[in-house]
Image (cartoon, rainbow, N blue to C red):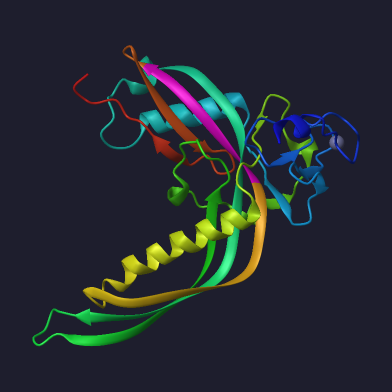
């Protein structure tokens, strides 16, 4: 597949389309046209973009503000830390909008004698799937700022930013979402029953959106150790922040 795919040119502007092994949806950096590598076909679903609202200097202010505030941080963290890396990356996500229904039968054992209970969990989700295999990212902590979503526009992407292509296709993302939501429902229904005898989950799909969102990947050094931050480039919220131990 990689040999064939290497020869793909953008079917919109004919520029060579760059990608790495394992990537299956790629976006032309010259015109923003998106292609499914396996088929060479144009994208036939929504591709959206969340805008980044920070430049590098503003992001540094944001980082130092985070270092200066909050609990459990060394007092000199902002003063003594050095920002080593501060990179804007547009990560690809799938958003699965669906109504998911789980019917279950279980045993309620908190009374004697135990009783059998039937129940139903029905919820609506915009469930987020990161479309990369190896990236460490706190997907469940991340609330995609969907209000800032626009149709994908390559002209809004900063020249210095990196745009990662999808390694997970639409069907796979849907399967993963269904599995994760079912696990979530399994967790929820434990409030009502102690032992599950039977459960079945159905997903009614409303929409699937392919989306690139701006995340800043930051490395900072404090007293010879390196720490990582991941910051939402739309809102400036720190999604993951390593804090040095107070004993250092
Ligand atoms: Zn192109």
Q: Quadrant of residue 110?
A: bottom left
Chain part drawn in magenta: 212-221
- Residue at point 50%, 35% (across, down): 134
Magenta span: chief secondary structure: strand
Residue sitting at the far right: 13
Q: Is residue 226 above or below residue 191?
A: above
**129 falls in the magenta region:** no
Image check: 6 left or right of 82? Answer: right
Residue sitting at the far top: 224
- Residue at point 43%, 49% (across, down): 141
- The quarter in which the C terminus is drawn is top left
Image check: 166 left or right of 45? Answer: left
> Disc count in the image?
0
Q: Quadrant of residue 53?
A: top right
Q: Position of residue 1 (x, y in %)?
A: 71, 36
**220 falls in the magenta region:** yes
Residue sitting at the far left: 112
Q: Position of residue 18 (x, y in %)?
A: 75, 29
**Observer-nearest of 28 and 75:** 28
Q: Is residue 71 above or below residue 115?
A: above
Q: Position of residue 207 (x, y in %)?
A: 66, 65
- Residue at point 76%, 34% (across, down): 5
**Observer-nearest of 76 and 224:** 224
Image check: 9 left or right of 26? Answer: right
Question: Quick check: which quadrant has ligand 1?
Answer: top right
Q: Position of residue 108 (x, y in %)?
A: 20, 81
């Amino acid at each position: 597949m990689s040999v064939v795919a290497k020869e793909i040119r953008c079917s919109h502007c004919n520029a060579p389309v760059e990608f790495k092994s394992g990537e299956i949806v790629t976006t032309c950096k010259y015109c923003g046209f998106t292609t499914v590598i396996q088929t060479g076909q144009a994208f036939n679903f929504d591709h959206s973009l969340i805008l980044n609202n920070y430049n590098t200097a503003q992001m540094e202010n944001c980082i130092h503000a985070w270092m200066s505030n909050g609990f459990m941080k060394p007092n000199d963290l902002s003063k003594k830390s050095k920002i080593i890396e501060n990179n804007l990356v547009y990560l690809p996500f799938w958003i699965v909008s669906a109504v998911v229904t789980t019917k279950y039968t279980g045993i309620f054992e908190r009374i004697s004698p135990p009783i059998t209970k039937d129940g139903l969990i029905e919820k609506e989700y915009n469930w987020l799937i990161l479309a990369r295999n190896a990236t460490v990212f706190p997907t469940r902590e991340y609330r995609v700022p969907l209000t800032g979503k626009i149709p994908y526009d390559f002209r809004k992407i900063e020249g210095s930013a990196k745009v990662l292509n999808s390694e997970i296709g639409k069907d796979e993302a849907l399967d993963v979402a269904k599995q994760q939501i079912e696990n979530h429902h399994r967790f929820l229904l434990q409030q009502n029953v102690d032992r599950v005898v039977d459960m079945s989950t159905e997903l009614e799909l409303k929409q699937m959106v392919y989306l690139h969102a701006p995340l800043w990947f930051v490395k900072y050094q404090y007293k010879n150790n390196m720490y990582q931050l991941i910051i939402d480039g739309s809102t400036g919220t720190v999604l993951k922040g390593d804090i040095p131990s107070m004993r250092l």
